[in-house]
Image (spheres, rainbow, N blue to C red):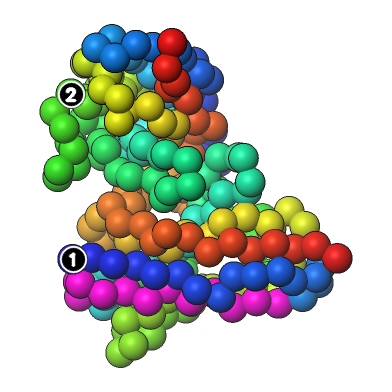
């Protein structure tokens, strides 16, 4: 069955860095576009970043552009989010999610999420 | 960017009730709309995509309709497991992908 498992969250000081990982299994990872989506405590969903199946096409939300970098390793069935210059407003549960079909922009499988807390 | 709004922000309903949630896009998005259900502490679950296509495994009491700027999610007969928060999301024009603010369905 399809599984997405995030890791790498934790407590970090403002200005610090963190790298999130998402391990995929149960499907051909290299065939699917993937995204990171976050949810601040008690708030709604915010799309963060998107990467095509080959990694050649990447998009970011304006709120993270220039600070976050999405990448993937299809040989390792893994998705990553490198987060630099973290701010308090980046505090959220971060989900990785699979696109239903190439570039559709609908997310049919989500991980359980990993909590990132940015605080001094 | 396309802004998404939802109404109501919350609704109290009883088991067996018909519940309708509305989502509006700030500009036309054709049928590029999805609906998700989220329960506390859990990841969202895709219910409907392309405005009216039922995701595999989702009960048929859930249905979606609309195109352009106005969309609805209908739960024909509310079940105990349906108490949750529901989000719409547009996929017509990205980046960015944008979500509505959510509608909480709770027990009357």
Q: Which residue shows up at 52% across the image and 44% down it?
A: A45
Is residue B41 found left or right of B59 in the rendered image? right
Q: Can residue B22 be seen in this view?
A: no
* Residue B27: percent from left, percent from top: 46, 28
Q: Does the magenta stretch include residue A30?
A: no
Q: Disc number at residue B100?
A: none
Image quarter in which the C terminus of chain A is found: bottom right
Specify few, some or many for label 2: CA neighbours under 10 Å numbering under 14, 14-19, or 20 or more.
few
**Residue nearest the observer in this picture, B14 or B100:** B14
Judging from the image, mark 2 belongs to the subunit labelled B
Numbered label tally? 2
Q: Magenta stretch: give its range.
A: A17-28
Is residue A102 found left or right of A8 in the rendered image? left
* Magenta stretch, overall SS: strand
Secondary structure beneath label 2: loop
Judge whether A22 appears above or below B107 on screen.
below
Whole-Å distance between the Cαs marked 1 and 2? 25 Å
Secondary structure beneath label 1: loop
On the image, numbered disc 2 is attached to which residue? B61
**Residue nearest the observer in this picture, A33 or A27:** A27
In the current view of this chain or complex, which residue is farthest to the right?
A: A120
Judge whether B102 appears above or below A92 on screen.
above
On the image, numbered disc 1 is attached to which residue? A1
* Residue B42: percent from left, percent from top: 43, 48
Is residue B106 found left or right of B47 in the rendered image? right
Judging from the image, mark 1 belongs to the subunit labelled A
Image quarter in which the N terminus of chain A is found: bottom left
Specify few, some or many for label 1: CA neighbours under 10 Å numbering under 14, 14-19, or 20 or more.
few
* Residue A57: percent from left, percent from top: 41, 70
């Amino acid at each position: 069955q399809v599984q997405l498992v995030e890791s790498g969250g934790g407590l970090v000081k403002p200005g610090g860095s963190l790298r999130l990982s998402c391990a995929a299994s149960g499907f051909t990872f290299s065939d699917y576009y993937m995204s990171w989506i976050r949810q601040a405590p008690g708030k709604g969903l915010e799309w963060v970043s998107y990467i095509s199946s080959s990694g050649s096409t990447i998009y970011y939300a304006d709120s993270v552009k220039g600070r976050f970098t999405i990448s993937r390793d299809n040989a390792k069935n893994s998705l990553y989010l490198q987060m630099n210059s973290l701010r308090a407003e980046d505090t959220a549960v971060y989900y990785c999610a699979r696109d239903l079909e190439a570039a559709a922009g609908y997310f049919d499988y989500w991980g359980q999420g990993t909590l990132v807390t940015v605080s001094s | 960017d396309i802004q998404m709004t939802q109404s109501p922000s919350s609704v109290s309903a009883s088991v067996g009730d018909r519940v309708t949630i509305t989502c509006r896009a700030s500009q036309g998005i054709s049928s590029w709309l999805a609906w998700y259900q989220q329960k506390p502490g859990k990841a969202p679950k895709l219910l409907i995509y392309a405005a009216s296509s039922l995701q595999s495994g989702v009960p048929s009491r859930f249905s979606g309709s609309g195109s352009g700027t106005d969309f609805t999610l209908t739960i024909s007969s509310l079940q105990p497991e349906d108490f949750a928060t529901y989000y719409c999301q547009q996929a017509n024009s990205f980046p960015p992908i944008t979500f509505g603010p959510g509608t909480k369905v709770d027990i009357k």
